[in-house]
Image (spheres, helix red, strand yellow):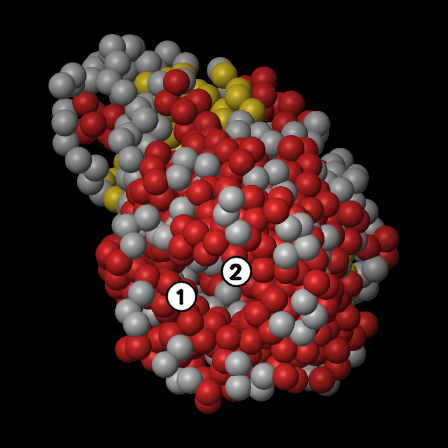
Amino acid sequence: MHTTSALLSQGIALHQAGKLASAETYYLQALKANPRDPNANHLLGVLRGQQGAASESLKLLEKAVRLAPGVPMFVMNYALALKGVGRSRQALRALDEVLAKMPANAAAWINRGLVQIDLGLAEESIASYDRALAIDPRIAAAWINRGNALRALDRSAEAVASYDRALELAPNAEAHCERGNALVELRRLGEALESYANAIHRNPGYLEAYSNRAMALLLLDDAEAAVASCDAAIALKPDYAEAHNYRGNALLKLKRLKEALASYDRAVSIKPDYAEAFNNRGCALFELKRLEEALASCDRAIAIKPDYAEAFSNRGNALFKLNRLGEAVASHDRAVSIKPDCAEAFNNRGNVFLDLKRLEEALASYDRAASIKPDYFDAAVASMHVANQMCRWSADTARADLIARCQVPAFDGTPFAFLAMCDDPQLHHDLAKAYVRNKAPLPGSPLWRQRTAREKIRIGYLSADFQEHPVSFLIAEVIELHDRSRFEIFGISAGANDGGEQRRRLEATFDVFVDVSAMTDTALARRIAEAEVDILVDLGGHTKDGRILALAHRPAPIQVTYLGYPGPTGAPFIDYAIIDANVVPASDAHAYSEKLVYLSDCFLCNDRKRLIADRTPSRAECGLPEDGFVFCCFNNSYKINAPVFDSWMRLLGAVPGSVLWLRADNNSARANLQREATARGVAPQRLVFAESVGSNSEHLARQRLADLFIDTFPYNAHSTASDALWVGLPVLTRTGRSFASRVAGSLLHAIGLPELVTGSFPEYEALALRLATHPAELRALRDRLAYNRATHPLFDTPRWTHHLEAAYQEMWRRHCDGKPPRSFGAKADRSDNGERKQPAVLRRVED
């Protein structure tokens, strides 16, 4: 018969050797011999805790404390068991009981610090660790735990110093790994990777070091290496949920969405209460456009973790795309109430408010996001753009500051807003290039494949604007006029179907019309590749809902930008930009990554079938004076800026009885423009705002009431200038250096009125004043415009289409000859009788 003491002695020896199962046998025998032995209950309780049986461990340790009250070691381990089951307040009281008797017990102070961290008392925990270290400064674990507490207080630099002290005392994997975590928080990523490498060197099975290294690699934009690091952890422990989750994050970054989803699914199958993985899974489903499932995944994350701000924000994003806008706002509101410094939630809420046309609230949300995170380019640029929409003009210094801050390699905000902010084509290119580099998927193998030659060149037009939209109004007749004996014309619609007349017309006009709006970028690109499109023409660029980034997958052998985006795309996967010599002079070709295709007359296409309503309303019906001169500008409000408005107000001041007729874009813009007019000494009643009318034809008809269209700068009138000239309304413009600032000038050259193109505000104002005060000259100008409308190339859509087709044929010829893209001028060949010559069929050169 073994005595209880002998059984426990043998069990302790085995326990210390790490042979838990064998030690358990002896402890159980001791308990059977004497169930009330406090030592047996204590030792088995500690062992059960190490085995993961937290509840049983707590019961045994509680019994030991009852049987032998006041034994410090018993009380301390009982406290740790209480901590393990979430009863941290009781644990803290138990440790204080130990320390009351043994204030020099360093281990008790360390454990007290651990419990305080659980209770969110990071400052108090540091004080506990400092007490432990005052007793014995050589305890490495205390330095590590102290570093963890400092990190909880965002004092990461101090945490690094604490980990360094631990490493001086006892180099170990845990200190290296935690040091790496602190360095990640400090964005000292190279040093962090070195720390993780040291942790893994000391402990090749250290799972957390592999997964945390993956996070650092993601921040360094090395997602492939991050996947490999997670794979190393999973090889060691296939059911390591955290590694599967981080692997999903890396795959999401790589736009390998289905693989990312599979990783998240594996993570939540291993750990069903893994809120972070459910939230990230929602992000993958959102990117896959499986919105209802994304919403459900975010809801599951919130059910597990009710105060999960990021999940509420991602839920709001899904609701936004589902057009449940009120619910989306509420979800983002909940996110920012939980986490007032969540910049992403404020930015996302701004997006919803913008869609709801609640511009003041959108601006406030974007501003809050940008103030929390100064390098948050999406929010900073959106803030400036919304302020411009509201005609709430910031000082020139604020605009210059934004432009300067955005000129960094990390810029990933939309470059579109800068077209209205500055007149610098090189800057437009650089911002677009940075945006594409940071937003586009990494280039892989081109999706397009060699195929057998066919007689017709297959042209695909990609747009999110095949609806009641200026792009559709301009291009519809071109699609109808394409020569079907030489071309097949595909419409690839990436936007909403508004069910309108223009949408129906386009669906009937294209040879093939495909709706890809619900597809991911990868699926969209594959659909284009499957259709064997030869020349893909993107009509959106970096505009709202544009899908140009999908073309990074190279679904077509030739990829072209045209019409929708008046500037360089900065995209290395776009081969050509269709322009003319007026909008992009040869001196500015260096600001374009695309090869430039110069159309001979004007880059802008037109639709001669644009209807103008038969009835022209009276001036009184439109709120205009019967006799006063009517200046007008129907450009979007974001194109109006302080220098332009200064010119306009000087003109109103110089022309008695005149008014300025503007588009009623939004109530904020209206109120701000009226206030700005008053500040310049002009009665706000002299600004007349054109309310919405039922159709574009009615809007065109009422423009006949105006006397002169005065343009904006640096973002000119484009389709609005075309509309004005189509109805016979002269357009006065100021031209600059950028594409966006030269479009109206291109139109005026093409319709034979180059004298209306000015190069400075003084010249612009002087000519506007002369035309407003010399009615005979203005009348002669209008007569010329009416005549030139039928005789000049601007509205000669068949001629324009022939030139475009010549451009397509030259692009295709070069490709078939195995030559790289080059810039060239495009003009259709014509036979003596004016008909197009039929060129020989171009066939591909096969590899």
Residue 372: x and y in percent read 57, 72
Label 2 Cα crowd, 10 Å radius (few <14 / some 14-19 / many 20+): some
Q: Based on the displayed image, in which of its 4 quarters is residue 573 positioned?
A: top left
Residue 217: x and y in percent read 34, 54
Q: Based on the displayed image, in which of its 4 quarters is residue 271 positioned?
A: top right
The quadrant of the rendering that contains the C terminus is top left
Q: Based on the displayed image, in which of its 4 quarters is residue 289 positioned?
A: top right
Label 1 Cα crowd, 10 Å radius (few <14 / some 14-19 / many 20+): many
Residue 493: x and y in percent read 54, 29
Precedes in sequence: disc 1 or disc 2? 1
The disc at residue 178 is 1
Q: Which residue sits at x=53%, y=86%?
A: 104
Vertical placement of 646 versus 540: above or below? Answer: below
Which residue occupies the foreground of this view, 721 or 412? 412
- Residue lying at the far bottom of the rendered structure: 134
The secondary structure type at the circle numbered 2 is helix
Q: Which residue sits at x=49%, y=15%?
A: 511
Q: Which residue is mark 2?
A: 378
Which residue occupies the foreground of this view, 824 or 510? 510
Q: Is residue 706 visible?
A: no
Q: Which residue sits at x=26%, y=58%?
A: 202
Vertical placement of 462 versus 487: above or below? Answer: below
Q: Is residue 492 visible?
A: yes
The disc at residue 844 is none
Vertical placement of 7 versus 339: above or below? Answer: above
